[in-house]
Image: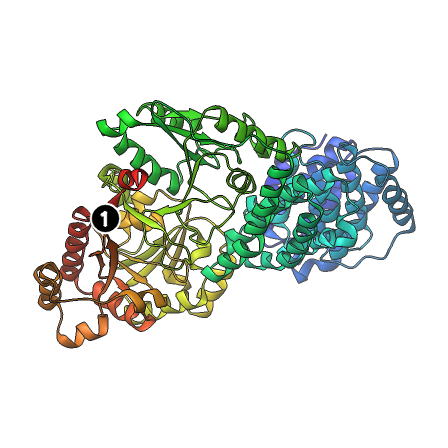
Amino acid sequence: MINFSEIEVDLKKLILEKQHTQYIKLFYSSFQQASTTEDINNLLVLLFQLEIEYKIYKLSDSTHQYKSFLLLIKRIICELLSQGVIPHQEYLHLYNIFSHFDFDKDQNITNLLTYFKKDIKTISWDNENIFIENNIIFLLEILNGNKKEALIQYTRNILLTNIHLGQRGLHCQFINMFSSSTDDFTIDVVLKSINFYLDSKIYFHLTINKKKSLFAWGYELLINSTKFTKNLQTKSLYPQLKSIIDILIQKNEVEELMSIEFFTMISQMTIYQKHEESEKFNTEITYQCGEAYQKFSMQNNLIQAQKYNNEKKKIAFIFERLVAHSPFKVVFSLLKQLQKEKHFREHYELEVYSLNYFLPIVNTKEIEKSLTDIGVKVIYPVSTYLELDNYSHRIERALKIRNCMIQNKVDIVIACFNSYDILNFLFASRTAPIQIFWSHNDGHYDVPGIDKRISHFYQSQSKFDFEIFTMPADIERYNPKVNMAKVKKIRESYPKECFVLGSIGRLIKIESDEYLETVAKIMEQNPNTIFLACGSGNQEKIKEKIKELNITDRFYFTGHIDAHIYAHIIDLYLDPFPLGGGEALMEYRGKGKPWVSLIKDTWLEENLNINFENEYLNNNINYLLKSLYSEEDLKLLRTRHYLINENKTARFYQDISAVQTIEEYISITSRLINDKVLCEKLMEEYLFCMKNSSQMTFLDLIQK
């Protein structure tokens, strides 16, 4: 009987002592002694674990011995297959080892491949056997010396299978694990496999369920996986996706259109770094799909929303799902404030709708309770999450949500997200008498049926007119109490005598050569600085760039963090560009700490006409600036002001740290790094302006 614990100890000892030949010999003899399938499985698992960690197969001093060892494994597995034994999917990890060596083709294996490749074509897309046979085919290709093409074919076969086969999530988990540990499983393999099916000559011959499988697996690999998430190369899918969407619009195939529109949006818009890209997408995809949904609603004579005689006007805020992301936090602050106002409660009733797009990442019940505790009703028009129900009819889902809102006699619907297929359908088919889009990040969003656009910050990049309203100051949200002992402990994990620069948010926002080069120049001028990249996302491209810039040893990736904790750790927030920080920056600023932003657009040049004769400006801003800067500094820093027209009266919101050139960005950053008093003065002015802002309120906006 094989003692696996003892073998594992001996193998690790040989590895640490660099006795690689002895390591291979011990494994070889252990496999020879294996008398049962269970023994072989256990030895293979041990082999995978050790090789993933130590990669002995790559060492040149053991190449010949290792290849002989693999020939033994190859013979054992072929014998198991000939006996009808179904190999575990973990056997696929052999790819990492076998692909490192060259093997001659084996006729027996070739014959088996011919059989399975023919048989798999007869299996239904939703039969568990299709996964089993796909694994066997890939394993045989590995043993037969085929490499990357076998990996691409394996991926292609996965893409058309029912993503819900077997126990929920196990196939997804394994494939994510396998791709993470396999160097050859690259973004190119995934994109090449998806693009294969997006060829119109192939795509339109697939069944609707296989098409939905393609998009479900595409979402799983390109959005949910840690290895490929938000990779910029995913943009290569856009031309073929757009081509299919155009054809579906012409054919009026609304059900299929909704599936592909969602995948296109989630795979493309989440990786855009320029406003021009978002604008192009909204023009070419979102609005065109919206027109198709509008046409569908007219052709099918859908019940139309009408003006209701509700005792109180009913306002419905809709979200893609209920999670504590930035847009929800902003909206919740507003709802909490509105519910405190007697006049509002007497005339309006609030509801929050969740469309249940994704599985929640936090306890939805806690979020629901936070809403009901302040008197806001929470409604789920559909009970299942789309990830659990990828093959349901999207149009039926959209109609169910729409009918629910019409039956509830919603007077005003306010969308707190944008560009999702079902939301586009709700707007285009007219779900409420008044339909409002609240922009939290994308001022370019446009579909038929939007009556008004609103935001709590200025949409300077947008071609649309937005009505801007003041968000009530919510100190509890922007500067909640945190465990300062935890802050101190985390801070102590970084170099002590240093100034901490950083940003918080999705890593794709800092995946900009221009931004990283700017950070590198700042760090070069200020050797006492480090940079914290706080947030989740793909790190590989950023790591390549910072290595080139020679700042790797001073650049830290924190992963997903508590933004409020790290806002106390970062000394100066360097707002990414071209995509700026969103709610994370607002939360940072709420701590009374300095930041620097780059605002590069013609809107500023056209609208910034600062009048220093204005009494308020003269008494507050001009005085502050002249007391802090020399005339030369003032010319360099060029303070910027946002001007707002409200009832033809010029009012302003001041943002000293917003600059227009990279030279200014570097200059003011270096100044702030070395002048603590200046940081404090600037933030005093910022907090003063925030508290004394006189913009339009949400209630003013709704009553207009």
Question: Which residue is found at the position 65% from the left and 44% from the top?
Answer: 257
What colour scheme was applied to this rendering of the protein?
Answer: rainbow
Dot 1, crowdedness within 10 Å: few (<14), some or many (≥20)?
A: some
User: How many discs appear?
Assistant: 1
Q: Where is residue 103 in the image (x, y as percent from the top left)?
A: 81, 57
Relative side of 507 to 234, left or right: left
Outermost bottom residue: 632
Quick one: 261 or 569, which is closer to the camera? 261
Question: Which residue is found at the position 28% from the left and 31% from the top?
Answer: 336
Quick one: 407 or 38, which is closer to the camera? 407
Quick one: 217 or 117, which is closer to the camera? 217
The image shows residue 300, relative to residue 455, as above or below, that is above
Relative side of 281 to 124, left or right: left
| The quadrant where residue 58 appears | bottom right
Quick one: 424 or 564, which is closer to the camera? 424
Q: Where is residue 290 in the image (x, y as percent from the top left)?
A: 56, 46
Which quadrant would the N terminus be assigned to in this image?
A: top right
Which quadrant would the C terminus be assigned to in this image?
A: top left
| The quadrant where residue 634 appears | bottom left
The image shows residue 309, relative to residue 100, as above or below, that is above
The image shows residue 639, relative to residue 358, as above or below, that is below
Specify the amino acid type for callout 1. Gln
Relative side of 588 to 183, left or right: left
Q: Is residue 439 visible?
A: yes
Pointer 1: what residue?
A: 695
Q: Is residue 600 visible?
A: no
Q: Where is residue 497 in the image (x, y as percent from the top left)?
A: 24, 59
Q: Position of residue 38 (x, y in %)?
A: 73, 31
- Secondary structure state at the residue bearing disc 1: loop
